[in-house]
Image: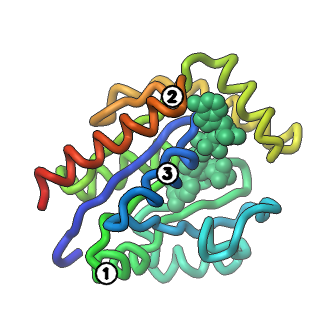
């Protein structure tokens, strides 16, 4: 890609707090913008098409794969596809924004490999696995089946933390939000 800008990447198991942290950063820094991914998963009640995700059919998703529109995509859960659109990143860079991602660990590694030191890759770690389960349950967003898939995947994902540039242990939320702000500021100060 021409003229690469900067990117901030947040990965970690479902329920670790990525969305909470990313949303906070987007409210406190207007030089950041969220990379809206495409997905085939059903929309949750509180989600908005074009803001949280582009919710599309499996057919549309496969057409985009064939057309080379994704810089990375993954079947994150059985039958559910998620992918980062090249056009989305280019659009946000044109607006001089730092692009913020919330992607799974594999997708995160791929983005890190593509953009190298233009990306700060942060792993969001739950304080422990029981608390992760508790938060996921409290979020009340999952069916028993999707809950089980998320728990099974999280155990693998936790082993990847040391491949990231930084780790935030998301115990006390307020501290995690401050830490995320500090890491973003430190990284972006060196790049601009
Ligand atoms: P993810 O995007 O990683 O799946 P979320 O940001 O949706 O995770 O967080 C999962 C749930 O846990 C949400 O209901 C959120 O409000 C809650 N949560 C996030 N961070 C904390 C924290 N430090 N302490 C308690 N609850 C938290
Ligand atoms: P959720 O369904 O809870 O929104 O997200 C499930 C998982 O998919 C999370 O780990 C999230 O980070 C990941 N995800 C969201 N968008 C993308 C994407 O574009 N690419 C990849 N590889 N993973 C994504």
Q: Which of marks 1 and 3 is nearer the N terminus?
A: 3
The answer to whether any part of residue 153 appears in the image is no
When the figure is inspected, residue 154 is found, relative to residue 188, above or below; the finding is above
**Mark 3 crowdedness (10 Å alpha carbons): few <14, some 14-19, many ≥20:** some
Whichever of labels 1 and 2 marks the residue nearer the N terminus, that label is 1
SS class of the residue under badge 1? loop
Q: What residue is rendered at 31% in x and 33% in y?
A: 166
Q: What residue is disc 2 on?
A: 170
Alpha carbon distance from label 3 to label 2 = 14 Å
Q: Is mark 3 on a helix, strand or loop?
A: helix
Q: Report which residue position mark 3 lands on.
A: 24
Queried on whether the Cβ of the residue with tag 2 lies below 8 angstroms from ligand 1, the answer reads: yes
Q: Badge 1: few (under 14), some or many (20 or more) residues near its Cα, within 10 Å?
A: few
Q: Name the residue under label 1.
A: 95
Secondary element at image label 2: loop
Q: Nearer the viewer, residue 186 or 86?
A: 186
Q: Where is residue 77 in the image (x, y as percent from the top left)?
A: 68, 48
Side (left or right) of 67 relative to 51: left
Quarter where residue 176 is shown = top left
Q: Residue at coordinates 80% horizontally, 47% vertically from top-left? A: 141
């Amino acid at each position: 890609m021409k003229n690469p800008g900067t990117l901030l990447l947040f990965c970690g198991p479902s329920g670790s707090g990525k969305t909470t942290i990313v949303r906070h950063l987007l409210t406190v820094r207007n030089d950041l913008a969220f990379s809206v991914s495409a997905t085939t998963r059903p929309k949750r009640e509180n989600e908005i098409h074009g803001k949280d995700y582009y919710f599309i059919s499996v057919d549309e998703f496969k057409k985009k794969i064939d057309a080379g529109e994704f810089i990375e995509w993954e079947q994150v859960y059985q039958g559910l596809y998620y992918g980062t659109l090249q056009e989305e990143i280019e659009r946000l860079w044109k607006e001089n924004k730092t692009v913020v991602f919330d992607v799974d660990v594999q997708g995160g590694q791929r983005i890190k490999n593509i953009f190298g030191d233009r990306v700060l890759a942060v792993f969001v770690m739950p304080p422990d696995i029981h608390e992760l389960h508790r938060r996921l349950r409290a979020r009340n967003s999952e069916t028993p089946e999707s809950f089980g898939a998320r728990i099974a995947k999280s155990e693998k994902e936790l082993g990847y933390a040391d491949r990231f540039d930084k780790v935030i242990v998301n115990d006390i939320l307020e501290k995690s939000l401050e830490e995320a702000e500090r890491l973003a500021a430190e990284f972006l100060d060196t790049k601009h």
